[in-house]
Image (tube, rainbow, N blue to C red):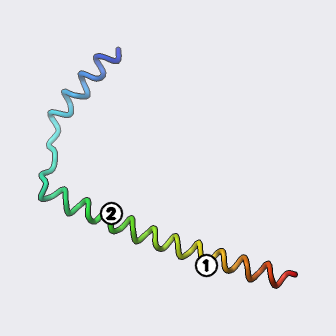
Amino acid sequence: MGLRKFTKDVIKEGKRVRWPKADVLVPSIVVVIVISFLIGLVLFGEDLLGQKLIEILSNNAK
């Protein structure tokens, strides 16, 4: 299967897909962005706590 046929098949299949309407898509995008931001905040907090813990442990070891 050549690249040209593959590209043609992908375009053909893309036209058959039932894409979501904007009124469904936009709220979904907002949910994904909010959840990603919250997970980022949690990871940032864990990183800061881990950094402080390592500092405390390394100062106590001296």
- Position of residue 45 relative to residue 25, above or below, is below
Residue sitting at x 72%, y 76%: 54
Residue carrying label 1? 49
CA neighbours of label 1 inside 10 A, class few (<14), some (14 to 19), many (20+): few
Residue carrying label 2? 33
CA neighbours of label 2 inside 10 A, class few (<14), some (14 to 19), many (20+): few
- Position of residue 15 relative to residue 38, above or below, is above
**Direction from residue 60 to residue 28 in the image, left or right:** left
Q: Position of residue 40 (x, y in %)?
A: 46, 68
- Dot placed on the residue nearer the N-terminal end, 1 or 2: 2
Quarter of the picture containing the N terminus is top left
Residue sitting at x 28%, y 65%: 31
**Direction from residue 47 to residue 59 in the image, left or right:** right
Q: Position of residue 45 (x, y in %)?
A: 53, 76
User: Which of the 4 quarters of the picture holds residue 13?
Assistant: top left
Quarter of the picture containing the C terminus is bottom right
Mark 1 lies on a secondary structure that is helix
- Amino acid type at circle 2 is Ile
